[in-house]
Image (cartoon, rainbow, N blue to C red):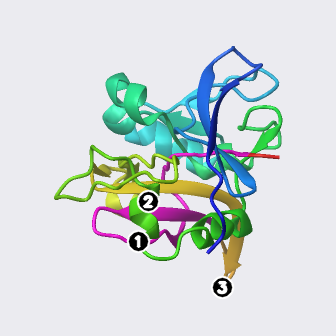
Amino acid sequence: MISIAQETGILTDSNGGKKFKTVKIGNQTWLAENLDVSTFRNGDVILEAKTKEEWQKAYESKKPAWCYYNNDPSNGAKYGKIYNWHAVIDERGLAPIGWNIPCVSEWKTLNLAFKELGGKKLKSTNGWKDNGNGTNESGFNALPGGIRLGSTDGYIFIAIGSEAHFWSSTGATIMGFNYGNDYELKYDDDYLRDNMHDQEGLSVRCIKE
């Protein structure tokens, strides 16, 4: 098991001055909360898609977009924003300066840092349904912010309190279709696992360059 040298800090985003908690886990430094920005590094505004139609149009036109879970700002205060794939891969940069959206290999390194009950060590100590709370020994503080599903499911919001989904910056092409990779934790998971999404909206964690 990788040695965990936990060290916490605060990141002040140079674009807007917003402050984020950070944590060092092994040789990686992560945001210890979900990303919550509405502009790219250069100050360009990211569309807030408040309706299903706006979310679908953004996906189909390959336009970056974000929303709050259930379009409720009070969820944003706790869980941050939900972003679409186009926001994650936009060249203007979603992550603060000096930080990146983690690639698959960086997520795997985090996953390998904890062998037994790794998921529980990444989860927050409260907020998870059905006794799914973690120990947060890592300081990562994974929050069950839910997900916005894709078009086949009507772009509805589900799983707040029971699932955490985080984008990676690594895409994939399968049978000619483009996908974005994400990593997820569920209320009954003991490990962080990978998955694939395309049209959905997920939370974002950033990793220091």
At 40% from the left edge and 46% from the top edge, which residue is drawn?
Answer: 143
Residue carrying label 2: 121
Residue carrying label 1: 117
Amino acid type at circle 3 is Met
Secondary structure, mark 2, is: helix
| Foreground: disc 3 or disc 1 | 1
At 73% from the left edge and 29% from the top edge, which residue is drawn?
Answer: 40
Secondary structure, mark 3, is: loop
Q: Which of marks 3 and 1 is nearer the N terminus?
A: 1
Disc marking residue 63: none
Q: Earlier in the sequence, mark 3 or mark 2?
A: 2
Disc marking residue 175: 3
Give coordinates of residue 36: x percent, y percent.
55, 30
- Label 1 neighbour load within 10 Å: few <14, some 14-19, many 20+: some
Q: Give the range drawn in magenta.
A: 180-207
At 62% from the left edge and 59% from the top edge, which residue is drawn?
Answer: 4
* Dots 2, 1 in contact, CB < 8 A: yes
Kindly give the residue lying farthest to the bottom in the view shown: 175
Viewer can see residue 178? yes
Q: Is residue 43 above or below residue 35?
A: above
Numbered label tally: 3
Q: Nearer the viewer, residue 98 or 201?
A: 98
Viewer can see residue 62? no
Amino acid type at circle 2 is Lys
- Label 2 neighbour load within 10 Å: few <14, some 14-19, many 20+: many
Secondary structure, mark 1, is: loop
Amino acid type at circle 1 is Leu
- Label 3 neighbour load within 10 Å: few <14, some 14-19, many 20+: few
